[in-house]
Image (spheres, rainbow, N blue to C red):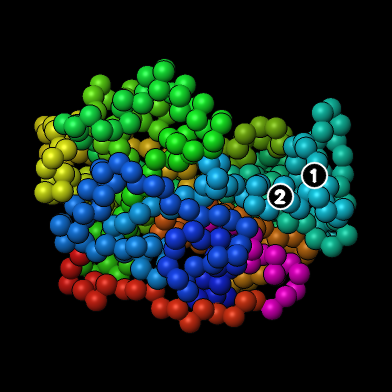
Amino acid sequence: MGAKGWGWADVAPYYQRMEHSHGGEDGARGTNGPMHVTRGQRANPLFHAFVEAGGQAGFEVTQDYNGTKQEGFGPMEQTVWRGRRWSAANAYLKPALKRPNLTLLRGLATRVIVEGGRAVGVEVRRGDRIERVGARREVILAASSINSPKLLMLSGIGPAAHLAEHGIDVVADRRGVGANLQDHLEIYVQQECIQPITLYSRLNLFSKAMIGLEWLLFKSGDGATNHFESAAFVRSASGVEYPDIQFHFLPVAIRYDGKLPAKSHGFQAHVGPMRSKSRGRIRLRDADPATPPSILFNYMSHEDDWAEFRHCVRLARQIFAQPAFDDYRGKEIAPGDNVQSDEALDAFIRDHVESAYHPCGTCRIGAADDPDAVVDPELNVIGVERLRVADSSVFPRITNGNLNAPSIMVGEKASDLILGRQPLPRSNMQPWINPRWQVSDR
């Protein structure tokens, strides 16, 4: 898509530089970076049953989907270190705040100041005052796939007709700003568990208090994990070269927000296609920086998305039907045994599908002469000097997995571009591709 220098071999070294992998594939993973990547203890037998069931269904098993072999069922990784979520703030920002050349300002960025086609600073609202922060060299936006395009449009960079609607002077007419919005959706397939071994027994107030106390005292126990400790990446059909479906497994039947848990012991798979063809957009509601933008994800607007989601649900049912779950499997909680036809599954999907919180693509990278690209391969905003974007908004297509690591990788690679350093040497690792990909989904 014109993103020269951003292929797998180009970015793999930046993943290695950013991470400290605990238990990953030798030689394929970084072991000295600021981002700690760990694995849960998988003490619950259901985590192992899920992986075993995947193998029984004919799918691959992998020991490290973040290594050379993504395809298969195996342990899930998490950015947790010593019982805490190891965020980019912990890994990068907090240590850097000790440096004399970094100042953290709290406020609302309202626009990039562009003079003569060049970014010269940022305007920030702090309390009831508007302040101007000057830039001697350049401005880098890392405000997310929602707010980076919003800030560009408030600064006069975006679709000219849309900016004119709101009385914003056009600095650079870039129709791709705010376009190409993508996300991952997922659905829960929930199964009753006939053995009392799930997290359902931990949902009472006493157990929650004990979990919290153990975490406060020792940073261990059920408060020190996100409980997604097994996962899978598989292909949806023959002819699909690399994984396009993701599973997370959870040993309890519950919603993300903790509401409406099943009234019994249960387990669930979160599943969804990773390469939706639907595209949304970000637009301004008005020229006031305090006004939230207009966000249209346009979910499920492509017909193929419906077929892919039906396949995901049926595939999850196939996994739960394997012998590995015979000692645990009760009745299906959701969608439910009565939901079988395409029409019934579509209704279930329409009512229950959720975002996986992976928005991206709204300032996409591409060749400098691509009218739909927003940034060039150096992350420079096309048409404006001394302005870059470095966050998930630059993804041309959504990644085959979660967005946390790829977003941080963009920052790592951006740091070399900003400093004018030579990029890290391209990786000579070869990602594993299923030799049967042309004839089978497994």
In the rendered image, is residue 361 in sight?
no
Which circle marks residue 93 in the picture?
2
Cβ–Cβ under 8 Å for marks 2 and 1: yes
Callout 1: helix, strand or loop? loop
Instruction: Give the mark nearest the N terminus, 2 or 1.
Output: 2
Residue pointed to by mark 1: 104
Residue 307, position as x, y percentages in the image: 23, 50
Q: Quadrant of residue 369?
A: bottom right
Residue 222, position as x, y percentages in the image: 43, 35
Badge nearest the viewer, 2 or 1: 2
In this rendering, position of residue 253 left or right of residue 94: left
Near mark 1 (Cα within 10 A), the count class, few <14, some 14-19 or many ≥20, is few
Magenta stretch, residue numbers: 405-422
Which residue is pictured at 20% across the width and 65% down the height? 442
Callout 2: helix, strand or loop? helix
Which residue is pictured at 55% across the width and 48% down the height? 81
Kindly identify the amino acid type of the residue bearing the numbered disc 1: Leu
Q: CA distance from mark 2 to mark 1?
A: 10 Å
In this rendering, position of residue 107 left or right of residue 150: right
